[in-house]
Image: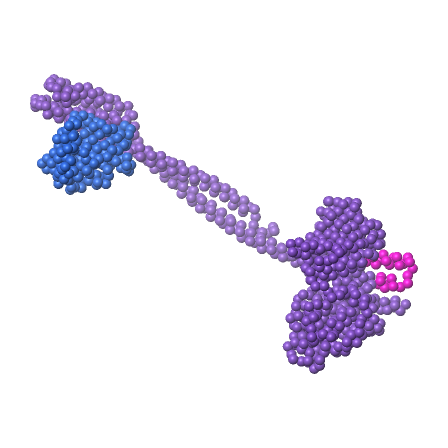
Amino acid sequence: MAATPFSGDVIRKASRITAVLQIFAVVLLAILVSVYVDISSRQRDMRDAVRENAMWSVYQLNRESGDLVHDLQLLLFSENLAEDRLQELSVRYDVVYSRMNMLKKAQFEKNFAIDVGVGRHLDLVQRIIFDSQPIFDAITAGQPVSRQQLEDLDGQWSRLFRATSDLLVYTNTFVSSERAKARIELEGLQRKSIALIGLLVLSVAFLILTLQRQLRSVQAAGVSLEAMAEQLSVSFQAAEAGNRAKSQFMATMGHEIRTPLNAILGMVELLELGRLSPETSAHIRTIRRSGEALLDIINEILDYAKIEHGKLELERRPVDLQGLAETCTDMMRGRAAEAGNTVTLELAGDWRARTVLSDPTRLRQVILNFMSNGVKFTQGGRVTLRMRQTQRKGVLWLRVEVQDTGIGIDEEGKAKLFQPFSQVDASISRRYGGTGLGLIICKEIIDRFGGSVGVDSTVGEGSTFWFEMPIEATDAVVSSQGERDNAPLAALRRLRILVAEDNKVNQQVILGYLDHLGQDATLAENGALAVEQAGAKHFDLILMDMQMPVMDGIEATRQLRAGSGPCCDVPVVALTANASEEDRRLCLEAGMTGFQAKPIGIAVLHRLIREMGGSSREEPDAVMSQPPVTTPKPAAVSHPVAPAVSPQVAATVSARRQEIAEILGEDGFQELLDAFFEDAVDILAGLHAMLASGERQKLDPLLHNLKGSAANIGLMDISELSQALRHSDPAPADIERLTQMVDVARQSLSAKDQTAAA
Amino acid sequence: MRILAPLAVLLAALSFSAPAAWSLDKPTGPVILTVKGKLATPNVGETAQFDLAMLEKLAGRTGTMKTPWTEGETQFSGPLVRSVLTAAGAKGNVLLVRAINDYFATVPAEDAIKHDTILATRANGKLMSVRDKGPLFLIYPFDLEPALYNEAYFSRSVWQIKEIEVQP
């Protein structure tokens, strides 16, 4: 971050400039206002200045008085004092009178009327005019006027004329000085205006300048922000990559830890089968329990890594809720008894929908987590599992409660419950252990289901953990898996069955099973051979592996359905290790009738044949509408990652061995084992070679092969790691680990043989 | 004040002039206005002469306004210049308005046609004497058109009018 060119300085500078700009804008505004006020006051003055012209008026007065004096003297000189001439003189007087009145009353230029000198002169003029008024009033009235009176008038009027002349001169001086004053004022105004305009121009120029600077700084800020964003994005990507690497590392480490742990648990189980002293037996039980606890923790961590990475995916399969509840209580019973607890199951009398579409593994995980918490924090009490269904706004909801009579949780503790890496308090983790991830995983799962999780608790009385989620009802499965597993396998009609399978071990298992079930089985090594054989001869059922060399199961089925051979409408059931929705869709699109997850058990095979047996031609769709449910009896076998409380992973080999041995005999299983290890040596050698030569695209078929055959004999860890490596980019170390696991398996299985022999 | 029209004279003027709308009656009282120039209906020789009664009979207006020559608002009333010109049958573009003291101003005939300019006979309802700028005062309608209130029109506002000479 230190290298970024974007710094606070730029921003601060820009804001300082903005502040200056604002002040300038205000000043500018003030100047503008003052200019406007000035101009408008001048305008008012100008309007007021619309006045009568004083100079002109005074001149008129002077002229009229001069005329009057002139006329009077003319009259006196002519000695003719006729009435009409006197009247004329009287009119002249009236005119002078009106002129004088004008000067008193009219509005002249500024200051003229109030000037003392003007007033003095005007008063004198007025006095003289008023003095001669009686004579003229007499003339107007037609009374005789004596010559003496007129001569007196002449004397007065000569004074009047002089007075008006003086007034004229005075007015001229006055007006001139006023004009000069006005001009000076005007010049002052002009100077002021020029100064104002100059200021305006200056401010505008400065405004433009600062705006330009601000624009530049904003641009610079934008550029550095962009650079910073880029840098951030790079850092984010780096962080993301780091996070991904961490998740990858966690996943790898999980497998790394689980592999030896599985070996330990397997060995322990083998040891338990032997005759042991009670003391050793107790020790071994402790080892097993500790190992199982450790496995739980690792599974939780792996789950959390998945959740954090958004890789938690949910399945949608029919789930028998009652069966699920019973399985969970059964699984908890043993552990509960160890702590002196009883486990009870309370179910609603009748289900609205006993079978729903959901993810049974995840559901079981949540219920078992709640129950194992209940058992963990309860001593000599009771743990109750309740299930209830309600209808809300047309949607079916499932509510599951696990109530215990344990220590309970206070309010503070409740708040921390669903937080990652937190336990109610540190002493709890010391006393009871656990990662503290269990509940957050549960919450995450239920959130994904669109439901909610909660807890009601009273300290000292116990807690009730519950979750609610919307569920979707579905058709009930014909019969539960458990019943069939336990039921003896009924005799079947002999069918001709084509098995397309490339894996040696798988071939042996399936052929062995089919032989045991009294079926007429034919083997095809790959898809192309299967199409060829199916074209030559009629079969009643085709079991098709999905991934095979030369031609895969999908393509083979497509060709089969497209052709017109004797088997073009025979039921084809896909066998696959990856039971994803995508695979299911691909299979159905290719024209397959059913879909079966591997490794296939004898019971499932039996059911499959029975269903296809009598009705293969008439109702090939029957299988489609009721897809085989792949909920195998031991949860750990098909879902080893699930945090089963008692996974007994190592026991899967023996479980599988038992199943195979029942049908093929112990020797048959041993043969399978030998074949597997033989194959494994070749495959591993191949893997090493491909890795060395860099032909990475050839790794996948080999890993797939190893995965399938390992699963077939119950070596789930090897199978899982092979599968995991298919999706990652395997390093030589990974292949080395695979090799070691195969070695461990070989040793442990031969050890088992020895134990069995002993 | 000297040209006070007796009521009888006024009435006589009214009764005589009423039927003769196309020709101008002869003045019966003292003549206060003489219109000269090219006239269609002269009444005394080549001129049209008016006494007060004749003028006050013509279409006129009354307006209250401020002028530079009066204190405060003053109500002026009198015949419209254009009605005087019409009565005289005068044709022309320029009016030479002459005062008693032979002062004159050149007034465009337009001022009489476009604006309601009057020859005020009365200020505040009273006849104006020569001492009070009578007997006739050319008053522009400053109340109706404030734009006229400036020196150009002030100089045309002739008072003590005795004669209008109509020029082409």
User: Residue A97's spot in the image, x, y percent?
Assistant: 20, 25
Which quadrant: the C terminus of chain A? bottom right
- Figure colour of chain A: purple
Q: In the image, which residues are magenta?
A: A267-293
**Residue A289 among those drawn in magenta:** yes
> Between residues B16 and A419, which one lies in front from this camera angle?
B16
User: Residue A203's spot in the image, x, y percent?
Assistant: 43, 42
* Displayed quadrant of residue A616: bottom right
**Residue A729 among those drawn in magenta:** no
Residue at x-position 76% and y-position 64%: A480
User: Residue A394's spot in the image, x, y percent?
Assistant: 65, 56
Residue at x-position 78% and y-position 55%: A345
Identify whether B105 is placed above or below A79. Answer: below
* Residue A685 seen in the current view: no
> Between residues A272 and A603, which one lies in front from this camera angle?
A603
Q: Main secondary structure of the magenta part?
A: helix
What chain is colored blue?
B
Residue at x-position 58% and y-position 51%: A4
* Residue A161 seen in the current view: yes
User: Residue A293's spot in the image, x, y percent?
Assistant: 80, 56
* Displayed quadrant of residue A67: top left
Q: Is residue A209 left or right of residue A82?
A: right
Q: Residue furthest right?
A: A277
* Displayed quadrant of residue A50: top left
